[in-house]
Image: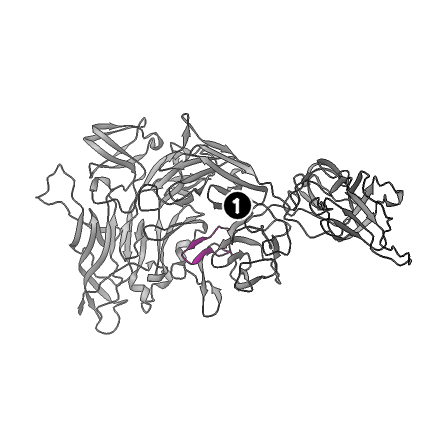
Amino acid sequence: MAKASPAFTNFTAGQLSDRLDGRTDIAKYANGCKKLQNFLVHAHGGATRRPGTEFIAEVKASANATRLIPFEFNVEQTYILEFGNLYFRIYRDGGQVVSSGSAVEVTTPYTSAQLADIKFTQSADVMYVVHPDHSVRKISRTGHTAWTITEVDFRRGPMLDQNTTATTLTASGRTGSITVTASADTFASTDVGRLIKFYDGFAKITAFTNATTATATVQENEDLRTELMPSYTATTIAFAEGDPSSTGLEHNDRITDSNANFILEGFKVGQTLTISGASNSGNNDNNLVVVQVTADTILFAPSNDLVDETVGQSVTIAGNLGATSEFSLGAFSTTTGFPSTVVFFEQRLVFANTATQPQTIFFSVSGDFEDFNAGILNSSALTYTIGSNQVNVIRYLTASRALLIGTSGGEFVVRASSDEPISPTNTQILRQASYGSANIQPVAVANVVLFVQRAKRKLRELVYSFGSDSYFAPDLTILSENITEGLIKEIALQQEPDNIVWCVMENGKFVGMTYRREEEVVAWHDHEIGGTYTDSGTTHAYGFVESVATIPSQTGTEDEVYIVVARTIGGATKRYIERLKPIDFGSDIEDAFFVDSGLTYSGSSATSISGLTHLEGQTVRIVANGATHADKVVSSGAITLDRAATKAHIGLPYTSTLQTMRIDAGGMQGTSQAKIKRINDVTVRLHKSVGVKVGSSESVTDLIPFRSSANAMDKPISLFSGDKEVEFDGGYETDGHIVVIQDQALPLTILSIYPRITTFDE
């Protein structure tokens, strides 16, 4: 018989997988938990009870799925957008943004079924939003209640590769609304809104007539002129014969302009020009090919023949709009699909993955996010397609020290081949890993990116290694694989105070991971939001979380966490937007908020509390003036307290449970695992806590008293920090678990646990 006093000094390994029950040889075993539900893990090592959620508002239509998206105008002005069926609404500082008494609402093209596939990126007051079935939109905020969503009118691209067939296009005019005629079937009804690049400009299709005919509007070209080909009329144009010696040999004939306007008017090498108005009919030609242009001289191909003529006549020089096979169609359209992901990188707006080009990335012009004019300048737009031996559909783009790309088949990095910003001449794409990514927007934490693997069971970190000059992607769920068995649906990062990555699961669970890689803290914790939800005959014994978003707080030091929770209330589905209360609530027990979908009454002493319509018929938990109160059922949106209170928190109850791993200490003959043992008593070191149960299982616990004869019965108990000892009610067993429970609406932070055990080796 051996006695021992092991110490559970921290919980920084979080909830561990059942598959690790026998792995006492790994260091994380001693710091892990068998169960960690509705507890958070601090980077310091302690576990604190998850704060409750504050009811903000019911979504516009509770019958429809809803998604939350953060909008950060600047560090002082941040918002949460409620995206629902064909609309979004706005929230800030725990309230809904209203104008003239009504919620500010903006119409969108996105249905409820499409919300999960929305991705976004933001720069200052403009957010770009993409969805594979819709043209790119941008959301703009010009005032607290002034919001718009508009279709992005891309300039000069991006375009598909140039036509390589014999098909030609002919335009009916050089400016304004034109008719475009193709020599073979080219157009579709889904091409409306699509760009065409031909001649020396661009046109946008506005109407479809048939497969060979479409109406289009001429757009601004790269010289900022709204024309397909230049046209210039002047009396300052002279003609020069290229063979004045009459040798009969071919020479370059030319025209000159004493006003030197040729470049300014847009004439370029390679154009075919038509000249009219010359006094000498031999100079009126419609097939002159330009081989050189300066401000005052245009040189033509040797096969073109002009005669000398001085200035004086009103001469018109215009680009020829004859049939051309040199054309490209726009890469974004209903025909080809629209980009599925977007990010800002090195002063460029970057899109990727259309239906017809799932492996292609489109970079804007540097510094001009809506210009996609390709070229060879360092600032030009560029298009890059991942080359591999399998289809790698791009799932996400994220900016780090390089542009990181997650695809269905692996992870890639885009960077310059030299130590310079990327450009059309130095860009390279390199595979870094082959895990494959889910279609879920990742989060960036410090200098790493956390992404969900393709099967949605693993969360990986994409980390750069200076030693190998490449990235690797370790599995963050390797010790806690069972916690994500519900499949990850959405993730968000709460940076303050403890770097927690929140995961919404497809089964409605809410899972968190405290992530501090520099302190080697990777701690998963499971959360069940208060309430119940019945869907398609299946009842979930918890509030069903559907979306999460985080923004920096406007009034405190902690990031704000917003969630959408579906519950069954009065037999009907209700979807509520709720906000997680601060983890550090302060030092006043009356400010401790540990109920879900809760509200706070603060005012004159009262027993009747109304305004609880959203919890009609629900049994609610109450803390009145910092002390527990008997549960009540909400009727007609109100409850009646047993005693008057000036401050009360009212909401749905939830239980926080921490269960240690099996104790591995005290055996005289090696390990104490699988040996009969008895835990005699336990000391729990607490911080700012009131109320706790300790026992050998969730059904066998003792309530530790906090109130003494020195405490006035009509006053709340002060927050306690220090050690609480309890005689253990467990018997002789081989497991040796310690369970700590808080089921009152009160705070609990566990710093460490010190059991005293007796082990029987034989």
- Residue 534 belongs to the span the image colors magenta: no
For this orientation, the residue located farthest to the left is: 710
Please name the residue shown 45% across and 63% down the image: 464
Quadrant housing the C terminus: bottom left
The front one of 199 and 130 is 199
| Label 1 crowd (10 A; few <14 / some 14-19 / many >=20) | some
Residue 661 screen position, x and y as percent? 29, 60
Q: How is the image coloured?
A: one colour
- Residue at the bottom extreme of this rendering: 669
**Mark 1 belongs to which amino acid?**
Asp
Q: Which residue is mark 1?
A: 117
Q: Position of residue 29 (x, y in %)?
A: 31, 64
Q: Nearer the viewer, residue 429 or 715?
A: 429
Q: Position of residue 250 (x, y in %)?
A: 87, 57
Whether residue 107 appears in this view of the structure is yes
Q: Is residue 209 visible?
A: no
| Relative to 607, residue 136 above or below | below
Range of residues picked out in magenta: 437-455
Q: Quadrant of residue 483?
A: bottom left
Q: Is residue 449 magenta?
A: yes
